[in-house]
Structure formats: C-alpha cells, structure tokens
Image (spheres, rainbow, N blue to C red):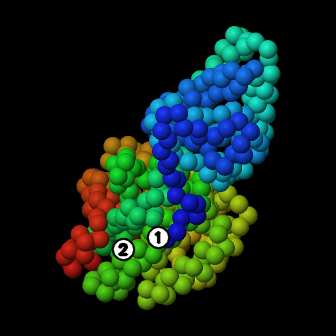
Amino acid sequence: MTPPNALLTTRHYRAGDLIFSQGDRGNYAYIVEEGQVEIWTELQGDRLVLNILQPGSLFGELALVDAKPRSASASALTDCILSLVTPDQVNQRIDTADPILRLLLLVVIGHFRSESNNFRGTDEPSPELDAALTKAKLSFKERITDAVDMIRLEGEMQEAIAKEQFHLMYQPIVFMNDLRIEGFEALIRWQSPKRGFVRPDVFIEVAEATDLIIPIGQWVIEQGLKDLKSLQTKFNSDLLMSFNIVGRQTNNEDFIPWLLARVDHHGLTPNKVKLEIIERTLFSGDSSAPWIENCRSRGFALVLDDFGTGYSSLQYLNEYKIDRVKIDKSFVDGLGTNQNSESICSAILQLSHALGMTVVAEGIETQAQLEVLRSLGCDYGQGYLFSRPLPFDQVMALPKDSFR
C-alpha cells in the first residue's frame, strides 16, 4: 500500500551548516530530533540570534502556511537530525480547522511576522520587544508540543503502512445461549519500533484527522477478509467478520464498490460482513441515509457501535434501518451491582428487539454480567469473559466445537 503522502524523512546537518536563509522559499517545516538549531537574522551587518531551538521544537512552519519567504535564517548550532514536515501536513490541518480558529491563526501569523519585521527594522534592539517575542515563543512552544507530536506520529504511521507494522487481532462474538462463536471483530494493533505499543484510540484519532485512515482501513478490511475466508474454510462457512468504519470511509464514494470487489475477490458474500459505525460518524451529514441504504441493498449488515454514549436519538433509529446495536461496556460494567445499569440495558434490548434489531453486549467480564444479560434476552456477547482479542494463528488453533 502506498501512503497518500511521502514518508516523513530526516536530514542530518553538521554544526555550522545552513538549513535555510532569510528570503528563501519555504519548502518544508522542521522538527528538531537531535541537536540544537539557531534562528538568526542580520541587523546592520551583524548576526543577531533570535532563538536557539532544542529537540522537540518546530520551526519554519510559517512559510508553509502563508507562502511567504523565510523571515529569518536557520543554522545547525550543533550536529543535528531534523524531521521534515511537508506542506500538505501543515496546510491540511489549516484547511480543515474550524473557520474561526483558522482566521485567528492566520491573524496571529500575520502579527508575528509584522512584529518580527519591526524588530529587524529598528536601529537598536528593543529589550521590551525582545522580551515580548521571547515570551510569545515560549507560550507558542508550550501550545504546539502536542501538535508536533501528532505530526511526528503521522510520519511514523506512514512508515508503519509502508513497512507493514500493523497487525490484526480478532475478538470472538458469541451466541449468548450456548457461548459458541458467531464471528469476530477485527481490531487493529500497532507495535511501533520507536514508541512500543501504541493504543488504537491514539493512532486512529490521528489517522481519522488525515487521509491515512483510507489506506489503513483498506488494509484492515483486506487482511480481515482474507483471514475470514480461511476461518470459514476450516470451521464454518457461516462465520461473520465485523469491521469498524469511520466518517472518512462513509464519505468516500469509492468505498462500497471497492468493498464489494474485495469481498468477491476473496470468495465471500456481503452478508458475512458487518460494518460497525458510531453515532457521530453516521449521523453527522445528509449523506447518511443514502449510504445506509446503499450498504443494505448490497447485502452488508450495519451495526451501531457504543449505543447510548453518543446522540442516542430515537429519531435516528426510526429513520435509519440498522441491523444490530452494541450495548456499550460502560453500561455492562454495572450489571449485577447497579440497578440503573440493568434498567438501561433492559430498555435498549426492548427497544432494539421491537425495531427488529439484534443486540451485542460489549465488555462482558464476569459471570454475573453474563447471567443478567441472558435474563434480559441479549442475543450476543463480546468480552474478556469469553476471550481477549487473539492473533490469527491462535484463532485457527481454537477447537472446532467453539463454533456453531
């Protein structure tokens, strides 16, 4: 799979090397990985140091945002390793920002450039202005720490796609009456060479904020379909696979045709594939109803994930035909000890069944939770009580009587 952007690359500089000169066209921004970088300008023929940047600092980004020439020069104060940040990585975030936030950012950039130009144009350095600029830079540095790490993480994720560092785990979904396996939910995992295990909620958030979710999502489905065919061949041709789908995929007009083609390629049928969506993804635009109808007309079942934690509007359940809902773990946790949790689960089950939907309870960890859900008529279960997510080879090693 080819990532949508070029890999975030690094460059090495020797102490004293010029990184860019004032007035140059801004091709990249930079993150200091190792060493120190000096930002400087010339004032009446003298070299005036504006800042010395340490590892973790971002610089050169203004030229990418407003397409103006570099306002200062940058040199390696010591031997340095710098990561390059592309214009797409910066501008994409500006373009997709809230309009008010984008306007404020551009105003701040303009003010910063104006103050910087005023500073360079004075006959004598102004201690007050110097102090103000230093304070502003320190505040800016504090605020962008998280943003810098996200950009760095994005680059590492691009590399992870290219080097096939992601892998899938499969968590069984069981019939509540006999606890045999109906199918699996495909869950992506990432063991980063630099960061170790990265939580899915961390890297998926970055992927969703960029186009990276498209190639990552395609890889998950491609690998999951391949493994499902192997599982069906060994155990049961009726086994199902659930995939988590996010907004950028539902908004991609090529997604459903691509999915149909991949299902057919692996010798599967759409009714063995379930697409799990969360409320805020599904109900955030006018295209939801046509997308749902398109999925269902092609034979794909839709699962409403984390039900009860989002908008939870009954209007949505009335308007859109959903095949299955998932009771969120936060409600399951209290079963057996909290009457409110039992009442909520009971209400979800009654409503879902009345609308012709089946129900999966997530995060089942105790026998007491299982017994309450059985008494309430829950159809399916998922959780550590039955199995943690398993790598494919361990799923293939399960006894045949684990499956219906």
Can residue 276 be seen here? The reply is: no
**Residue placed under numbered mark 1 in the picture:** 219
Q: In the image as oriented, which residue stretches furthest toward the front?
A: 45
At 20% across and 74% down in the image, what residue appears? 397
Place residue 141 in its image quadrant. Answer: top right
Can residue 109 be seen here? The reply is: yes
At 68% across and 16% down in the image, what residue appears? 130
Q: Nearer the viewer, residue 53 or 25?
A: 25
On the image, the x and y values in percent for residue 278 come to: 55, 59
**Residue placed under numbered mark 2 in the picture:** 183
Up-down relation of residue 185 to residue 119 (above or below): below
Inspect the image, locate mark 1, and give the three-letter code of the amino acid beneath it: Trp
Kind of element beneath mark 2: strand
Inspect the image, locate mark 2, and give the three-letter code of the amino acid beneath it: Gly
Q: Quadrant of the C terminus?
A: bottom left
Up-down relation of residue 309 to residue 247 (above or below): above
On the image, the x and y values in percent for residue 63 come to: 71, 42
Kind of element beneath mark 1: helix
